[in-house]
Image (tube, grey):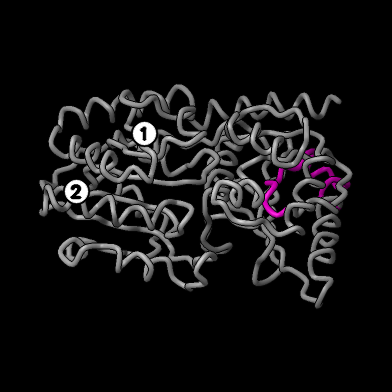
Amino acid sequence: MKIAFLTPEYPHPKTGTAGGIGTSILNLSKALSDLGHDISILVYRQDQDDSFIEAGIHFYKIKNIKVKGLSLILTQKKVERLINSLYDSGNIELVEAPEWTGFTAFVNPKCPLVIKEHGSDTYFCHLDNRKVKFKNKFLEKQALKKADGVISVSAYTGNLTNELFGLNKHFTVIPNSIDVSVFKPNPNKSEKLTILYFGTLIRKKGLLELPKIFNRVHDSKNEVALILVGKDSGDKKTGSTSTWQLMQPLFSASAIKKVSYMGAVDYSKIQQLIQEATVCVFPTFAEALPVSWLEAMAMEKAIVASNIGWANEMIEDGKEGFLVHPTQHKQYAERILELLDDPSKQRQLGMAAREKVKTHFSHDLVAKRSVEFYKTILRT
């Protein structure tokens, strides 16, 4: 099968850094390629037009066209021409794209178009209690309505998306995945107690709750360090250009001395940081099915995460990790302290977490499910 992924991001030295969407496409595309399928990655928002082949995967960098008031439609049509050219030349049979900002709303490919729901702007604004831009909601709804097939990374995301757009669009749940042979446990030889958060520093991921949680942990165990990893982000609610700047005054004078912010790091270093952590925390308000959780779970890390929506599709509270609402600072801190004080509990939850990833979120299993779905779309 010849499958193309259209995306605004992909983690590669030639295409730049990426968040969850890009990372999930990386994992799936590699697994599909390993199964013998031909994979093309079409990345827009690039600095130049270019193409190259690496590890048997075809990459196409697409530079957006910049004309005031016409940039979006002109770029959409540019992408449409590339897709149709690849289809006409027999290089692709089907294209998959995320619903984010509805980029494919006015892209009309000759081949079937599958939309994968990683969480639209409308979806995340709803979870973050922010008003969505009319343009984004309109485009996202149009993109979903015209899709030949819809995949959602979680049932929660699929159901809420239909509700928010007033749609009754059929979707198939196929989760994000990771390569469990890459993200695997290694003994943590460090005796230091560390809490790791990795991901974007942004309000919707609970980063303004984390200082209040850590203050309570610090009050009980002042030797514990908090390590933050990920790119900083602006805050739409306050207009601040830096969430990290908003976070700092929320830490107590004593607790902030135990906080290290490393900024964005290379994707290859994430494994080392997870390995060295005692506990990983994800106090987020808005996700679809986060790859970061899967990475920590696969490395047998004890996790305290959010208990909202999608979480129960990944973790059973008390079995593969602990789930607590991000605003429940006292309970959240108590769960972290429980793990810091009990290495056997860390191991118990960590081992169960890795087993969950192996049986439900392994990239080879997810790739096979994706192929079966693509076949149904090509047959219609």
Q: Earlier in the sequence, mark 1 or mark 2?
A: 2
Q: Residues within 10 Å of mark 1 (few under 14, many from 20)?
A: many
Per the rendering, the mark at residue 323 is 1
Quarter of the image holding residue 136? bottom right
Residue 240, above or below 312: below
**Quadrant (top left, top right, bottom left, bottom right) of the C terminus:** top right
Per the rendering, the mark at residue 217 is 2
Horizontal relation, residue 199 to residue 251: left or right: right
Amino acid type indicated by mark 1? Leu
Horizontal relation, residue 359 to residue 89: left or right: left
Asked whether residue 58 appears in the rendered view, the answer is no
Local SS, label 2? helix
Viewer-side residue, 166 vs 259: 166
As drawn, which residue projects farthest toward the bottom?
Answer: 68
Q: Position of residue 280 (x, y in %)?
A: 30, 44
**Quadrant (top left, top right, bottom left, bottom right) of the N terminus:** top right
Q: Position of residue 177 (x, y in %)?
A: 51, 35
Quarter of the image holding residue 90? top right
Residue 368, above or below 96: above
Viewer-side residue, 212 vs 356: 212
Horizontal relation, residue 109 to residue 101: left or right: right
Amino acid type indicated by mark 2? Val
| Residue at position x 31%, y 25% in the image | 318
Residue 293, above or below 377: below
Q: Position of residue 231 (x, y in %)?
A: 43, 63
Tell me, yes or no, whether the highlighted magenta stretch contains residue 70: no
| Residue at position x 38%, y 57% in the image | 208
Q: Which range of residues does the magenta coloring cover?
A: 85-101
| Residue at position x 84%, y 24% in the image | 379
